[in-house]
Image (cartoon, coloured by chain):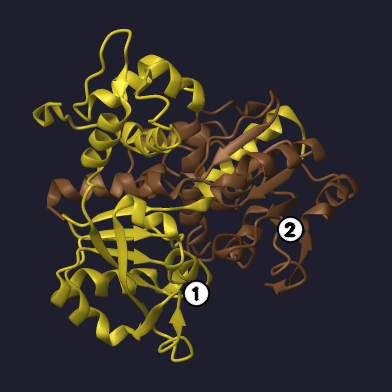
Chain colours: A yellow, B brown
Amino acid sequence: MDYDKQKVASLPTIRRLPAYLTVLRQIDTADKETVSSSYIADKLKLEPIQVRKDIAVTGCEGRTKVGYLVTDLIDAIERYLGWDSNKQAVLVGVGHLGSALLGYPGFMKYGLQIVAAFDASPKVVGSIVHDQKVLPMDDMPETVQQLDIIMGVLTVPAEFAQSVADKLISSGISAIWNFSPVTLEVPEGVVVQNEDLSSGLAVLSVRSSRTRKW
Amino acid sequence: MDYDKQKVASLPTIRRLPAYLTVLRQIDTADKETVSSSYIADKLKLEPIQVRKDIAVTGCEGRTKVGYLVTDLIDAIERYLGWDSNKQAVLVGVGHLGSALLGYPGFMKYGLQIVAAFDASPKVVGSIVHDQKVLPMDDMPETVQQLDIIMGVLTVPAEFAQSVADKLISSGISAIWNFSPVTLEVPEGVVVQNEDLSSGLAVLSVRSSRTRKW
């Protein structure tokens, strides 16, 4: 595998790569050492050419009539996504969603570790949520700076999202995973990924209304 | 507004429409009755032409130099997404994520009402989660049929996702909002929307690694 062959991928490609990992991890490599683009395409209802193009950005090369080595391909995708090493993040807003994310075992698979959780409410601060002691917001800047953390998970109510984002950024956070339904204004160099459940529901609503009326 | 002008939209368009709603709902219409495509584009870091094309699928028409009436545009998008009427759904799997979704106040804004929650674990069945009494899985088929529900929210662990999906479908569910990291096999006519947090994290990982190493 030649990592110099890694390319800059389009957003749709990047969004699909984790699904490839899910399919690959479901393969028992004791039974099946190699996998074809058609196999992955079939599982995810994509075109094989699309799968081959997406995989090409990771630098992993398949062989004609053999396909990709499953373990090689998993390594290549994880490396491309930066999921082969541990990344630390802080979470702000320990409500329903924040608590669910703190307890989500899947993040470790993506190399993401939430090392500290903060909340503004005195009712929540000090409580233990999924083995994390919730800390007061005032402690956030010091934690971020001492541990040199660059990623923040934002799960606060909409009306507080911008001010908390500002505070995260001034503390040194440069990547925000935003679960609040708000468009954040951030300075250049700060990356925001909005996780808006309503997008998925929109797609489901429209697609299912074509097959049958609600 | 001419609803006959509604068109079939691409998936990226459908995914963007809820973000337009978020921007529009933040506008105080007592102050500002109309909105331009440039205003929306600026808030969401899109191109105005993209915004105009997306809005065109809803059948809502703007006027030159005036823009769209905010309330008209909200109505048109909600109607296009089918969010102007209530849709009932059942949820299966009352773990961390399932509980968070049951308590998510935002769903009502999208016209989605989770009317019953089911779980297989005797430890969870009978408990009250966000005002919903958790019911045993055996009650699911009857509930779905009696209330003529077509949508199921799937928040079970990966290893149970396919068998629970099969059970939902045989009970009459034809639209599944799947939060399990599994590719479901479903018969034709059943619509699945996968909500995979790892896609968003992938985008954030790759984009932020371009600006700075983790």
> Percent position (x, y) of residue B188?
69, 23
Q: Secondary structure at mark 1?
A: loop
Q: Which mark is residue B119?
A: none
Q: Residue furthest top?
A: A65
Which one is nearer the viewer's eye here, B162 or B148? Answer: B162
Residue tagged 2: B118
In the rendered image, residue A44, in percent from the top left (x then y), is placed at: 49, 27
If the image is split into quadrants, where does the C terminus of chain A sit? top right
Q: Residue at x 30, y 63 (%)?
A: A113
Instruction: Give the side of residue B43 with respect to residue A87, left or right.
Output: right
Left-right relation of A33 to A79: right
Q: Secondary structure at mark 2?
A: strand
Vertical comparison of B179 with A150: above or below: above
* Residue position marked by numbered label 1 in the rendering: A95
Residue B117 vs A204, above or below: the answer is below
- Which of the chains bears the disc numbered 1? A
Q: Are marks 1 and 2 in contact (CB under 8 Å)?
A: no
B107 relative to A160, above or below: above
Q: Residue at x 64, y 62 (%)?
A: B94
